Amino acid sequence: MTERTESQVLETNEYGFVEDPRYKQCEKEAWYGIILGIVNLVIWAVAGYGLGSGPVEEYSYIMGFPAWFFISCIANSVFAVVATIYLVTRKMRDMPLDPMTKEEAEEFVRNGGKAR
Amino acid sequence: MSTIQWSTLLPIVCYFALMYFIGFYALKLVNNASLRKGGSGAAYMEEYMTGGRGTGGFVLAMTLVATYLSAGSFIGGPGTAYTHGLAWVFLAMSQIPTGYYTLMVLGKKFAIVSRKTGANSISDFLRARYESNAVLIIASLSIIFFLIAAMAAQLIGASRLLQGSTGLDYTTALIFFAITVVVHTAVGGFRGVVLNDTLQGVVMTVSTAALFIAIVMKGGGIANIVQAMKAINPGMISPYGVKEGFMTVPWVSSFWVLVGFAIIGLPAVAQRAMSYKSSKSLHSGIIYGTIVSLVLLMGMHLAGAFGVTQVSGIASGDLVIPTLITNLFNPVVAGIILAGPLAAVMSTVDSQLLVVVAAIVNDLLVNYIKPELKANFKKLRTITIATCCIVGLIIVALAFDPPELMVWLNLFATAGQLSTFLWPTILGLYWKGANAPGAIAGMVSGIGTYLYFNYYLPRPLGLHPIVPSLALSLLAFVVVAKMTKKPSEKVIRLFWEL
């Protein structure tokens, strides 16, 4: 880590300027949101239509709710909250939001994309 | 219903009085803050429109959720769940991502870019990114038309609710409600709106919890209620609802786009993503927002669906929630609980009003007509507050006697905003190749195909029309952007350079 020279710390892009180093992490975090959204959608669809499509007489129940509803809506919501807490505390990173100087940016990259 | 229920009205009046107080308190904050920053018009605009970018986590979550959840989630949605049962709750839960999705996807990059460009609104962002008058004018007009229609519809909903539950006549209810919203927005700006939204978010949560618990207790527990729903009609507990061919799989799934993934395109919602103070406030905002939005969505829709077992035969969907509340609680408590749905409407309308005022004053007036206003704090303040009142008068006039055009526009209000703003915002933020001709092609084809589908093909491929029109809009955007000139290097540097 320490033998890196300055020019390697901040990479230039195809336009020949140094790109804001925070954006890589920002883009990752955006993907977390999209992926979590898709997972919620899949659970919703599979549980809802998978368990709810049979005849109503044959439904099983969890805590009084039909199982399809309990899993697709209630358990799925609990999952969304747990996953959000996990992503926010473990995967998302603190960073300054104001424009950075070159020194601050280098510091930011050296710390592996964490705020000081 | 002709006599006024004073015991129900009184708590609501007290609640409204508090809104005024917060508005004027925020006015003082905005004034002090803009004077500290040199008293220029530009400083005032930043304070008025984004609260000086000082929103903390809990407040961010509350204002986002309260802005997003409107009469639709508190009055219309539960009313429909009353008719269609658990299937409609299932549909409404396509909004599971509400709390985290916008804040994660626009995320910190949106906050960083809006600080780099000094953007106070989604239009400011689009102006900086696309450098195009055409993009800005389409955006501003879309905001003005669609949001005015949406606000008028919300006012109608709230006034009917007040009328139905307190016995006030419609006109009095409308004027009473509208003045409260317009005054607190006009004087308090974003800060006032955000503070009020926070209070309203809390009121909404308490009201939802009280209503839900009361209904479950009265019905003898969830299991009993669900079996009673099944006895009324087995369709009430199936994901396909009670009406054959209405809640089909592709149509219901489309709501994941309409009210789930695409809500980033709502300017009032996106505005929240540029106002927070730090990445810490964003992080806690995401967690609170997810929890609160899920409790509110689930609680209100289940209350509507369960309500059918307790009060049967409510004819109009909009009357389900007020009828349940007045039937289940004594008049004073009913007044307090009713503050929840009223808060949902107010917190949506105030934010939308602010976006419309921004479109008129900030985007059109200051940029095209009178740029010298940027230097003059007092004059700009007068104009901003006056615009707010005038727009308020227009929506009251529309709600007073809804013209046919208004009803028509409101049908398209949400989808219209999504078609206009979704792709220009997302692609502008993440794709260097996004340019003005692409954005225009995307906006025009989005709105155009949506109108076309609505008239000629109401369920294309079984889907809600928003899905194919957003897909076509994306296609048009990307194809046109690839064929035309790249955005200027100046813009790319402004957005992407360190």
Image (tube, helix red, strand yellow):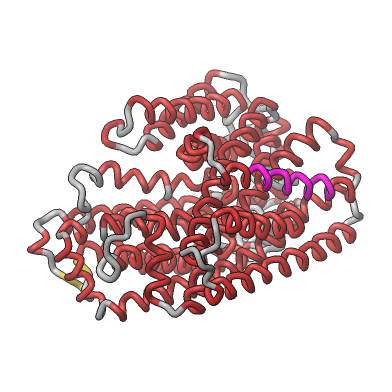
Say whether residue B97 is visible: no
Q: Is residue B302 above or below residue B400?
A: below
Point 9% across, 57% down: residue: A55
- Considering the whole magenta stretch, tell me its main secondary structure: helix
Q: Is residue B195 left or right of residue B254?
A: right
Q: Is residue B298 left or right of residue B103?
A: left
Question: Looking at the picture, how far across and down is residue B359, in whole percent?
Answer: 69, 40
Question: Looking at the picture, how far across and down is residue B349, in whole percent?
Answer: 59, 53
Point 68% across, 71% down: residue: B18
* Magenta stretch in the rendered image: B381-394
| Rendering quarter of residue A71 | bottom left
Point 64% across, 61% down: residue: A95
Q: Nearer the viewer, residue A67 or B239?
A: B239
| Rendering quarter of residue B30 | bottom right
Q: Nearer the viewer, residue A76 or B343?
A: B343
Question: Looking at the picture, how far across and down is residue B367, in whole percent?
Answer: 79, 34
Say whether residue B187 is visible: yes
Indicate whether residue B389 is drawn in magenta: yes
Quadrant location of the N terminus of chain A in the rendered image: bottom right
Indicate whether residue B158 is drawn in magenta: no
Q: Is residue B156 above or below residue B29?
A: above
Q: Is residue B230 left or right of residue B386?
A: left
Q: Is residue A73 left or right of residue B403?
A: left
Quadrant location of the C terminus of chain A in the rendered image: bottom right
Point 63% across, 50% down: residue: B271
Q: Nearer the viewer, residue B7 or B481?
A: B7
Question: Looking at the picture, how far across and down is residue B231, in whole percent?
Answer: 14, 66
* Name of the residue lying farthest toward the front: B2
